[in-house]
Amino acid sequence: MAIVGIDLGTTNSLVSVWQEDSCTLIPNNLGEYLTPSVVGVDENGEILVGRTAKERLISHPDRTAASFKRFMGTEEEFFLGGRRFSASDLSSFVLKQLKEDAEAFLKEPVEEAVISVPAYFNDLQRNATKIAGELAGFRVERIVNEPSAAALAYRFGKMEEDQTFLVFDFGGGTLDISIVDAFDNVVEITAVAGDNHLGGDDINKAIAEKFLSVSGLDFGMLTKEEWAALLKASEKLKMELSKSSQAEMETVISGRLYGMQMDSRGLLEASTQIMESIGMPLTRALSDGGYEWKDIDDIILVGGSSKMPLVQNYLQFLSGKKPLSRIDPDVAVAVGVGMYAGIKERMAVVKDMMLTDICPFTLGIEVSQEDREAPSVMSPIIERNSVLPVSRAARYFTANPFQQFCTVVILQGEHRIAKQNLCLGRLEVPVPMGKTEQDREAIDVRYTYDMNGILEIDVTVVSTQEKTSKVIVNPSIRLSEEEIQKRREELQKLKIHPRDQEKNRLLLARGDRVFEENTGDVRKYTGRFMGEFTAALNTQDARKIEKAYIRTNELLNIIENSPKRSVILRLDKYLYDEWRKDS
């Protein structure tokens, strides 16, 4: 039974499998490799996933959610169609769809998946991802860092060379930067940095804010639908500026058509703050790893947003090196995670490859300061970027005389003040009570951390050599098997729309979105076309439906791909040519 690899992305997700000595990307039921990480609930209470849901972001913003990966491991909730979902719930719907796609492609059940996450994800976020996989029906034994997977994909077939990569993973919602040393059959991460809330979505937002400023509009006057339409137009402008030096965007706000032209320089000016934010983790990764730009052999591009000339030129300006995109940045992680699935299955060609990981955050203990009025601070035990598995120990002393217990507070993070870090758990350790004011008991605290995010704590009282050991598990990190099963059953009660209808449902959702985006004659035309397509669907005649589908799809293409000033002329010409053909 095959193990699949999944790149669960902020904007798009992919599934892959290792077969016949190579990684195979698995298409979804629309024949596409990229499945938008978007989930919606329609008016009948059915769950929509992927492109169909994405089309409804504008027309039904209150029933549709995107970029929820940014909220993995938090208490953020999404209310769609009167129901409440966590980010793990929504991710599970995307993963379930990928599972069905894989089973349809492989013609066998798929029960296990290796899922990638940003290297900068903390334990809460990693375990939220694992829970999402389990809710989708997968067994998830391994979570892999996205940059590690990308480096693995580039490394394959070049094991005779020693290389140092900087993996620049810039997606829709996250930025991950990793420095990777590759030698023999080993791929070893030596430093990571990043920003979980920085991505191409932020460039879309910057363009949208520039549009409002140029048009003399205020954000507060926009409806949710208009803001969604503006972001979509901004994304389209951004993509056009990746192909040409100048582009134009238009959108309807309060019944009036507004437009703006932007060139490459204008995009750079609008994105200046974002570019500066990219530079900070780049500097940190190099500094943490003890590297300079001259030590980096190649820069690997990962994530759709890294395709932008603006981003590539900025990287080349900083490093003096032209970034690599030999593997499509959109699929590089999926290729690597598919390879790792092959490694896990002990496939012949890749079984001897080793993918090491590092601890992305510092792990430490809360300690009191000499000034008891001052807040407690964090004392690091395992520093960030330590290669996993790792075991480190440090000695501490009781804070007060006559103590009978020590409370070991386990922390994860980089802040000096203890409470500003993530608390992973607590451990009560009995200690002998001192006999005088000067007596202080010593304890040795050892942390052992592995690639699956399991942290073992061993606390030894020095005077007695008594040891207290425990695997620290924060109740908010992990769900019990019973809790996972209960939540899975609840989610399975929700109706998932029939997959064989998705092509038609997608076209209907697209038509609704085009209707929302336009006004006047274009809107009237759209309403007419969609009415005719709906009538064809109601006949349940496959031939009539297919004919209406082709016609409606072509007409919507004309509306979306034509300048506003000429769209009516092009529609009239298409309909006239069609009438003559039928005559």
Image (cartoon, helix red, strand yellow):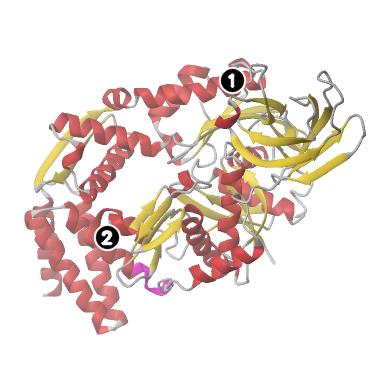
Residue 56 among those drawn in magenta:
no
| Residue 242 visible in the picture | no
The image position of residue 313, as x and y in percent, is: 42, 24
Give the alpha-carbon distance from disc 1 to disc 2, as whole Å.
58 Å
In the displayed structure, would residue 517 be above or below residue 222?
A: below
Q: Residues within 10 Å of mark 2 (few under 14, many from 20)?
A: many
Residue at image position (81%, 20%) is: 437
Question: Residue drawn 45% across and 62% down?
Answer: 31
**x and y percentages locating residue 307 in the rendered image:** 43, 36
Disc 1: CA contacts within 10 A as few (<14), some (14-19) or many (>=20): few
Q: Which span of residues is magenta-colored?
A: 499-503
- At label 2, which amino acid type do we have? Arg
Viewer-nearest residue: 290 or 551: 290
Q: Viewer-proximal residue, 227 or 299?
A: 227
Q: Name the residue under label 2.
A: 510
The disc label shown at residue 466, or none: none
Q: Is residue 96 left or right of residue 67?
A: right
| Residue nearest the observer in this picture, 579 or 256 | 256
Which percent across, then down, holds residue 350? Answer: 74, 48
Judging by the rendered image, the residue that carries numbered circle 1 is 374
Residue situated in front as seen by the camera: 288 or 27: 288
